Amino acid sequence: MILSCGGLAHALSENAAQAEYYKVDLRNPEEIADVFRKYESQGGIWGVVHLAALKAVGESGELPLSYYRVNIAGTISLLEVCLSIYLSVRGMWTHRWDPCA
């Protein structure tokens, strides 16, 4: 199954019929967590490919904070939710997470 949050339909054209789409704001951790929670009873989400970003070079110079909020803060929100869901599902809240382990 493919799960898409946002506008990834074009990139998934050959698998679009199998995809489930959710419109979420990556800057809102609760919206992201709601999507993850929907799959807890099915074994959870086991992987994430993050392709959502603003990318217009000229506009990024004119609106740098908007680009930061979406591209950087949105990515951080997604990673924090991934980490919190992973740790809570596995009962690992007492362990320090080491991304290099």
Image: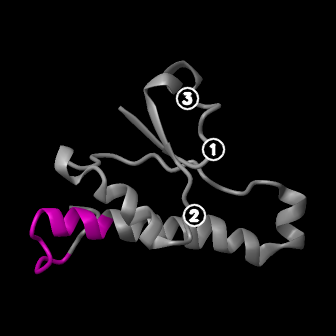
Give the mark nearer the N terminus: 1 vs 2: 1
**Amino acid found under the numbered disc labelled 3:** Leu
Q: Which mark is residue 37?
A: none
Residue tagged by mark 3? 12
Q: Please tell me how crowded label 3 is: few (under 14), some (14-19), or many (20+) other residues with Cα within 10 Å.
A: some
Which residue does the image show at 59% across and 69% down from the upper left? Answer: 72
Which residue in the structure is indicated by mark 1?
7
Kind of residue indicated by mark 1 = Gly
Task: For the N terminus, give its image quadrant.
Answer: top left
Q: Amino acid at mark 2?
A: Asp
Foreground pick, 9 / 38: 38
Which residues are the magenta region? 83-96
Residue 68 x/y as whole percent? 68, 73
Its colouring scheme is one colour
Q: Relative to 32, is 58 on the left or the right?
A: right
Q: Against 22, is 28 above or below?
A: below
Residue drawn at (27%, 62%), measured in percent from left and top? 100
